[in-house]
Amino acid sequence: MNTVTRRSLLAAPAVGLVASTMKGEVGKPALLGGKAVRTGRFPAWPVFDRTEEEALVAVVRSGKWNRTSGANVKRFEETYARVTGAKFCIATSSGTGALQSSLAALGVGPGDEVILPPYTFVATLNVILNMHALPVFVDSELETGLIDARKIEAAITERTVAMIPVHLAGSVADLDAVLPVAKKHNVAVVEDTCQSHLSEWRNRKAGTYGTTGCFSFQASKNLNCGEGGAILTNDEEIYRKCFAAHYNGNMTDFMHGTKFCITEFQAAMLLAQFARLEQQAKTREQNAQYLTSLLREIPGIMPARMHAGCTRNAYHLYMLRYDQQQFAGLPRGKFLKALKAEGIPAASGYGPLNKVKYLKNALHSRGYQRVYSSQQIARLEERNNCPVNDRVCAEFVWLTQNMLLGTRSDMDQIAEAMRKVQKHAGELVKA
Ligand SMILES: Cc1ncc(COP(=O)(O)O)c(C=O)c1O
């Protein structure tokens, strides 16, 4: 299973932008000895300057390094709540910590079921297993790669306590379908907004619709402080519980917790990075829209569709579906190799999370056996079949967000490389 591809892609050192465009070049593929469409790197990530350096030095010199002593965490939380329109924001040490604290605040525990999509980062599953609850997968949509919200209701049982729709790649899951079903069955919605900073559903920020919205500021993310996260909520009681959950109970007598605290260093970085986020988001959006207009013209390349309600896509990833039949049967792996040779790094994305070995191990562990009967686990494993997602995992291709921070001519080159590979797909199949 390939789960860390975008992180390793981003690890490439930056050498700036050297556009080597040769518009109209349809010569031999670089993989077969021809000239690459592009020799320069895409824009480097992370983006920083002296602002970050000075912010960090100021925290060091202040001697106030944790959230209770300094002012940066509080300032970031106020800023993020204001920009997203949420009543409350709690900065955390990671997106995983934000999700885990949300489930703790909802009292999710052994015997409960939690719904999630199978096309997501491992953390969405891990937080459910950490609570010894049952993860119930709802299949993906082929065209969007997101949870098929029309199938959620059928997955709800009297044990369902929460659902975690994931706004993958910056594209928002169909909240028009998710929210009414959740309300009807009194199931909490924890939005996994870890990849969708500034994304919007019907002109309101993603992460503000659910009981909580959970963000990640891990190094690959559009808003990045190395590692970090945040919880948004409009519910004061949930806010108090999430705060307690992420801070060892916060010396309250109503709840225990664990520790997912962010530091002043991370918050200072976030404030500096945040100043660039809106402009970067605009650039990504414009480039992505232009790229979509180019790629739509290439048979066999299908940019991931967005739901009509997604009025802003953060494009943490640019996702597309690859149909190898339209490329003379060229397997996706070889397509990616050919693109790489043309100077266009792309990744195959996630594998099916409902099929990972550690899920089976967890469900058959001593702890789970004490809570659930073997029939219950067998029934769950039968329900967790997601055939559409298997296709999503086999056919999707990802480009990372930093590639969208460049110029229109960068987008031209991405499309040009794909056209070139298609033109020579027959030769590449045989090579
Ligand atoms: C969809 C999704 N959920 C959860 C997480 C977990 O966030 P973190 O790595 O900050 O713990 C990530 C991060 O990669 C993610 O992409």
Image (cartoon, grey):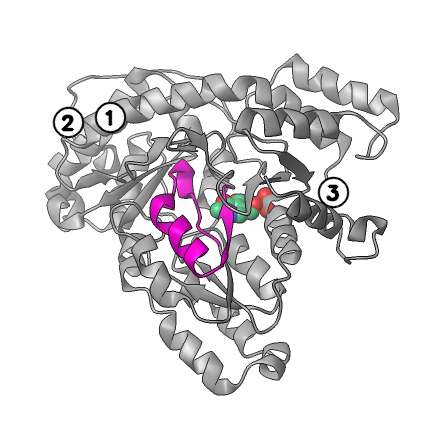
**Above or below 390: residue 420:** above
Disc 1 residue type (three-letter): Lys
Going 55% across and 21% down the picture, which residue do you hit? 47
209 above or below 177?
above
Relative depth, front residue between 429 and 362: 362
| Circle 2 residue | 27
Q: Are marks 1 and 2 in contact (CB under 8 Å)?
A: yes
The answer to whether residue 429 is above or below residue 286 is below
- Quarter of the image containing the N terminus? bottom left
Q: Name the spot of residue 131 as percent of width and height, x first.
A: 62, 65
- Which residue does the numbered mark 1 point to in the structure image? 35
Residue found at the far front of this picture: 184
> Relative to 394, is 381 on the left or the right?
right
Residue 271 placement, left or right of 33: right
Q: CA distance from mark 1 to mark 2?
A: 7 Å
Name the residue carrying label 3. 261
95 in the magenta segment: no
| Magenta segment boundaries in residue numbering | 164-193
**Which callout, 3 or 2, points at the residue further toward the start of the chain?**
2
